[in-house]
Every structure is written in structure tokens, then in C-alpha cells.
Image: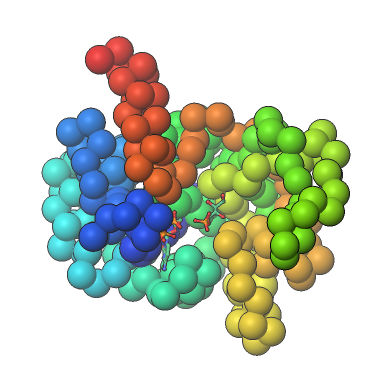
């Protein structure tokens, strides 16, 4: 199974002056933890890191220092996550059937989650890891007044990995480009094209490191995991 790792962001919400995936998390750059999980997942065979050219040298040094046994390729990132994944899809070998896409910023995903997603992808065209929402969610209008409260039992928080049939996802990305759709994940393109996306139970600890608080929580989770 091919794994594409979008890693070309800027870390604006982290308030970081450089790509947040290069920030230190318990003695390693954040993206190193993502790569170690991919390395430990028996179903992942090839890894594509989608990054900005200015970060390639640093990513290459990290991948080398981890002694990864799996081939790693670097792919030029785009201005948005959507563009970065588009570029990643173009880089896949011609007849690749399925792909898993996993945010570099979700550095606590376990190898087991990759494997469970890869297993389910054998029998469907689209899936995402997701967890049931714990909060009560409000839909609010432009002036801050609540419009309605969706039924929580039907709400799931999207995570990655997200997995797809490559030919279908490429078509959805093309359609998204043509129609100017702007989305924050690949499942949204699949949905807008009327294709089914299945849920795979994700992990509460599989947070996306977005803000400084997330970084502190990630460190806490990792310490617990490593017993340090
Ligand atoms: N042009 C972009 C933007 C984001 N990403 C990647 O998509 C994932 C999720 O994005 P996010 O957490 O929003 O990362 P940033 O864009 O770095 O953060 P921010 O939005 O706060 O700037 C990250 O692994 C990020 O590197 C990407 O590959 N290409
Ligand atoms: C793909 C994603 O991680 C699912 O939660 C998310 O949509 C990425 O986009 P964001 O804008 O960085 O939240």
C-alpha cells in the first residue's frame, strides 16, 4: 500500500516561523513520529512525503536518521492541502489501485490504525478514520446566533488516514479543480462527487497537531505511551 503524507503546510495556527512538522516533540521532529508509525505498519510499502522544496533537505535528513526500510519519495507540495494531495496523486506509479493519505501533523496515529484502514480499503473505494464527536455542536449564523443543534449521535470528527481508489480519487480531484471546490479533506471531494466514504473507527489520541496546546497534549500522550 502506498502512503502519501501531506507535509507542505506552514504552521500558521502554531504561530511557528517554519513548518511545524520540523518542531521538536520529545527529542524528535514531529514528522519523525509519523514516519516511525508508517515504518512499523506492515501494510505500508512505499511512502511519499509531500513537502515544500525548502523543507526537502530537512525531511531527507530525518528519514535517513530513522533508517527507514521502506522507499521514501519527495513530492512538491502545493499552496493548499488539496493541491498538495493532488500533486501526490500525480506522482503515484501509473497503475496504483489504492492509496492511504495521512497528514504529517497527525503524528500519534498508530501502526494498527494504518493496518485497519488498509484492510477495509480492500473492500471499498473510500474511507476515513473518524471518531464520534464528544461535544454538543452548534451551527451558528454570521452574527453569532445559534441556528440549530445537530443530533450528536450522527456526528463524527474526521481524521486521517483517509483511503481511496486512486482512479476515482483522481477524478474527484479533477472535478474539484474544474468546479473550484475548496475542501479540507479528500473525503469531501468524494462526497461531492456522490461517492460513498466509509468510516473506520479512528483513535482519540490521533490528534492533528495544529496549535501549541496540541503540541503539549501530544507530548503528554507520547510520554504515557513510552512510559517516560
Ligand atoms: N499547502 C499545504 C497545507 C497543509 N499541508 C499538510 O496538511 C496537513 C494538515 O494541515 P494543517 O494542520 O492545517 O497544517 P498547516 O497548513 O501547516 O497549518 P496551518 O493551517 O495552521 O497553517 C499537515 O500535515 C500539513 O503539512 C500540505 O501538505 N500542504
Ligand atoms: C484532513 C483533516 O486532518 C481531517 O481532520 C483535516 O481536514 C485537515 O484540514 P485542517 O484545515 O488542517 O483542519
Q: Is residue 14 above or below residue 183?
A: above
Residue, far top: 227
- Nearer to us in this view, 52 or 218: 218
Q: Dividing the image into four equal quarters, which quarter contains ligand 1? A: bottom left
Can residue 104 be seen from the camera position used here? no
Q: Which residue does the image show at 34% across and 32% down from the upper left?
A: 216
Side of 143 relative to 7 (left or right): right
Q: Which residue does the image show at 46% across and 71% down from the upper left?
A: 80
Side of 64 relative to 95 (left or right): left
Locate residue 197, reporting x and y percent.
73, 53
Q: Is residue 222 above or below residue 103?
A: above
Side of 128 relative to 62 (left or right): right
- Nearer to us in this view, 71 or 82: 82
- Nearer to us in this view, 173 or 68: 173
Side of 112 relative to 54 (left or right): right
Locate residue 110, reporting x and y percent.
45, 31
Locate residue 51, reporting x and y percent.
32, 65
Locate residue 74, reporting x and y percent.
29, 65
Q: Quadrant of residue 17?
A: bottom left
Can residue 192 be seen from the camera position used here? yes
Amino acid at each position: 500500500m502506498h502512503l502519501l503524507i501531506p507535509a507542505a503546510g506552514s504552521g500558521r495556527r502554531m504561530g511557528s516561523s517554519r513548518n511545524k512538522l520540523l518542531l521538536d516533540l520529545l527529542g524528535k521532529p514531529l514528522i519523525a513520529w509519523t514516519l516511525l508509525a508508517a515504518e512499523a505498519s506492515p501494510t505500508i510499502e512505499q511512502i511519499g512525503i509531500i513537502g515544500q522544496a525548502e523543507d526537502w533537505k530537512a525531511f531527507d535528513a530525518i528519514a535517513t536518521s530513522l533508517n527507514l526500510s521502506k522507499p521514501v519519495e519527495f513530492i512538491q507540495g502545493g499552496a493548499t492541502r488539496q493541491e498538495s494531495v493532488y500533486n501526490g496523486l500525480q506522482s503515484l506509479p501509473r497503475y496504483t489501485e489504492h492509496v492511504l493519505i495521512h497528514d504529517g501533523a497527525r503524528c500519534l496515529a498508530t501502526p494498527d490504525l494504518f493496518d485497519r484502514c488498509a484492510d477495509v480499503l480492500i473492500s471499498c473505494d473510500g474511507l476515513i478514520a473518524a471518531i464520534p464527536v464528544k461535544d454538543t455542536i452548534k451551527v451558528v449564523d454570521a452574527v453569532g446566533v445559534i441556528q440549530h443543534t445537530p443530533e450528536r449521535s450522527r456526528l463524527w470528527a474526521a481524521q486521517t488516514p483517509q483511503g481511496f481508489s486512486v482512479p476515482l480519487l483522481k477524478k474527484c480531484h479533477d472535478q474539484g479543480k474544474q468546479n473550484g471546490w475548496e475542501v479540507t479533506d479528500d473525503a469531501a471531494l468524494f462526497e461531492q462527487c456522490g461517492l460513498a466514504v466509509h468510516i473506520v473507527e479512528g483513535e482519540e489520541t490521533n490528534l492533528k497537531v495544529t496549535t501549541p496546546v496540541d503540541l503539549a497534549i501530544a507530548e503528554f500522550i507520547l510520554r504515557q505511551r513510552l512510559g517516560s
